Amino acid sequence: MDGILPLWKERGMTSHDCVFKLRKILKTKKVGHGGTLDPDVDGVLPICIGKGTKVIEYLQDSGKIYEGEITLGFSTTTEDRSGDIVETKAVDGVLSTEEIDRMMKSFIGTIKQIPPMYSAVKVNGKRLYEYARAGETVERPERQAVIESFQRTTEPVYNEENKTQSWRFQVTCGKGTYVRTLAVDLGEKLGYPAHMSDLTRLASGGFSVGQAVTLAQVSELMENEQIDQALQPIEEAMKDFPRIDLTEEDWQRVKNGQVLPMKAFRIKKMPEKLIAFYYQNLLVSLYGQHPEKNWLLKPSKVIRNEV
């Protein structure tokens, strides 16, 4: 079994929990996920199966779309609703939609973020959440994130009792973006402690909500021998990569992992992404520029050496 399964991860489960369960349901050990989702977050989690595991890193590098809720008035240890409250400040005057929208717009483009202490980023060989659970704090490396769009999708709601203000949003962002931190940083710009009070991932790795299936549905499809209805081809995950279809002669060289001249494929300039080589409409290999000889192409990842 080879391909990509767009899974709808339900809340309360880790991404690893999903992989563990799917290995049993699908009766195969070669299963991995293409981008971690926190336990409190539901949404699209691409699952790579068989030869599909060879493209995990490229799925993780892809853009993602989320919808969620931001709440002003208090911040938490985890930057989301699951953490302990660390700072409060009553929202006495309701913020205008104009001010909120203006500040949200200021985050569009390449921004800098400091990862949350409760995250999997490694510092000195340990993950930040390990320091956090031990009650330790360490200096966190600043990272870049790309925000393509960041929009409010509902009218802000003011909670008179708690003195908080919340609204829902949608964000399209690049790899490594911490949406929790985006909520906290937006709150800071608006003058209030804030946290991400809800989050759902709508799209990841080129797969969206409409394609996703739950664990229960996967189990049912397997029982009925209909898993192919949910399984997406590996090629679907790589559709945005530059494509070259190989002749029989080219295929003999590619399947043996040979270095190839760019001119053989009329390539004058190496594209930003790797080049996807196809044979008989199947993705067989990914090639990149040779590190020392820039007129040559070198295999970066062999997907199939037989078709």
Image: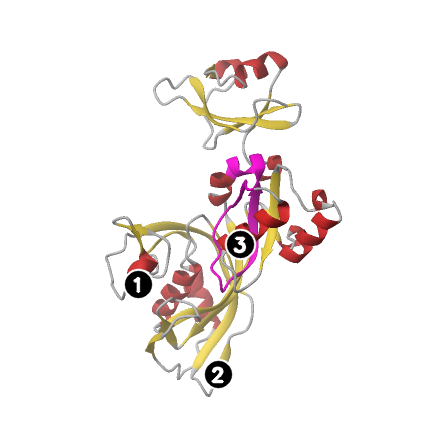
Query: Which amino acid, by three-letter code, is at mark 1?
Result: Ala
Instruction: Report the span colored magenta.
Output: 29-55
Q: In the image, what residue occupies the spot 57% across and 37% down?
A: 50
The residue identified by callout 1 is: 132
Residue at the image point whose x is 51% and y is 75% from the top:
156
| Label 3 CA crowd tier, 10 Å (few <14, some 14–19, many 20+) | many
Q: Is residue 272 above or below residue 116?
A: above
Q: Let me know if residue 93 is in the magenta part.
A: no
Residue at the bottom extreme, as displayed: 161
Return the residue nearer the eye: 148 or 194: 194
Tally of marks: 3
Of the 4 image quadrants, the one containing the C terminus is top right
> In front: 32, or 97?
32
Task: Classify 258 as above or below 270.
Answer: above
The residue identified by callout 2 is 159
Numbered disc 2: secondary structure: strand
SS category of the residue bearing label 1: helix
Q: Which residue is nearer to you in this view: 123 or 17?
A: 17
> Alpha-carbon distance for marks 3 and 2?
28 Å
User: Marks 3 and 1, how far apart in space?
Assistant: 28 Å
Image coordinates of residue 277 in percent, x first then y, are 56, 25
Q: Nearer the viewer, mark 1 or mark 2?
A: 1
Q: Earlier in the sequence, mark 3 or mark 2?
A: 3
Residue 208 in the image: state x and y as whole percent. Answer: 61, 51
How far across and how far down the image is residue 206, in percent? Answer: 58, 45
Mark 3 lies on a secondary structure that is strand
